[in-house]
Image (spheres, rainbow, N blue to C red):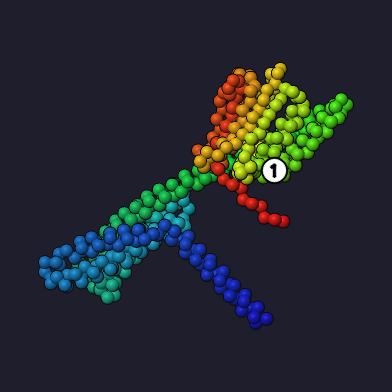
Amino acid sequence: MSVDRSQDRRVDAGEGALAALTLRQGLFAGLTRKGLTLVALLALPHALRRTIYDLFGSPLTDWLLQVASAYATGLIALLLVTVTVVAIYNRVSSAPRRRYPALALGIVVATLLGTAILGAIETHGTFDYSDNGGPLWWFIGTWPRYLLLGALLAAVFVYFRAAEESEAAGHQAEVDRALFAQQMDEARLQMLQAQIEPHFLFNTLATVRRLYQTDAAAAESMLDNLMRYLTVALPQMRTNDSTLGRETALAEAYLGIQQIRMGRRLGFAIEVPAELREARLPPMMLLTLAENAIKHGVNPLREGGFIHISARLEGSELRLQVADSGRGFVKTSGGGTGLSNIRARLSGIYGQGAQLRVGLNKPGGVTATIALPYAVAPVAAPA
């Protein structure tokens, strides 16, 4: 039992020390070396002003000692004001109607106390100021100067502290905005997946059921492609990262299904070097471009068309291209939502470091190119 109690006492002592340290850090936050240096520099001209008249009637060494003494006592008073201002600023509510009256009261009290300490040190506790009309007149003549210096220190501290807080708040707002944009981007992706998957699965299964009545081999091939599609797509429903290899397999399975549905009207080719398949790629982007090419490019044409997916590395930039030989740009072609979603996601993830460009394909159709920083996905640890 004694061992347990000693351990409890050590734990309590450790927690108490941590709480005290946290309180000190919160109480004197903003009390920096630069600020203390400024206070020290401000005390010097004040000490020179108090002793300048003694320079002409005393030896130099005696005058320097007087300056040092005046500097030390003045520094004590100014440090007392500084610590009081910092503590009040950190502990009192930030509402101006509470903070500024508290600061004013703190400066008055700190300068009164500081002036009293100064007088006690200079007179060795006697407060004998008979040469200056008595202690009261000395106090009346001395305290306003320290009050003015304290107000100046408080004004400088509040100004710079408010500027730092404003800058920090702006930076935090920018971080929150980026985080919110990323969260919205992920929510849009999940919503897009929730909208696409049931519709796509329903149409595919309906086609399979119809094909089993006319072409069992085609129906079986479509089911194989659907299984490949789901094998890649389902594990990625809850992730925000993927690889070019997985996304290529997803697009290939999707195009395989569409090719069975459209027959000779659709042809496609995929050229992705093996060494690029581990490149990191946000999920669903390549598939969205493939869907867009079919829906708005190839499918509206009676003769259909061809879709070519390729990837290449240019310096430190990965370029993915989906080109179709469809009908090209028309006002009613749509596709803006999918492309806008890709642009928003690229901006949220990479900032200005990635982009989506859409242009005309020759001799006809549209080419969509995603350019983003090349990075290799980490290797998954074996189970």
Q: Residue furthest bottom?
A: 2
Q: Please name whichever residue, 100 or 257, is drawn nearer the observer in this view of the structure.
A: 257
> At 72% across and 41% down in the image, what residue appears?
232
Number of residue marks: 1
> At 70% across and 18% down in the image, what residue appears?
303
> At 62% across and 76% down in the image, what residue appears?
7
- Give the x, y percent position of residue 141: 24, 61
Three-letter code, disc 1: Gln
Q: Please name whichever residue, 197 or 354, is drawn nearer the observer in this view of the structure.
A: 354
Q: Quadrant of residue 70?
A: bottom left
| Crowd around label 1: few <14 · some 14–19 · many ≥20 (10 Å) | some
**Residue 229 seen from this side:** yes
Task: Name the secondary structure under disc 1.
Answer: helix
- Give the x, y percent position of residue 265: 72, 22
Left or right of residue 298, residue 156 in this image: left
**Residue 351 seen from this side:** no
Q: Residue furthest top?
A: 302
Q: Please name whichever residue, 255 or 7, is drawn nearer the observer in this view of the structure.
A: 255
- Give the x, y percent position of residue 288: 65, 32
> At 77% across and 35% down in the image, what residue appears?
225
Q: Quadrant of residue 132?
A: bottom left
Q: Which residue is mark 1?
A: 236
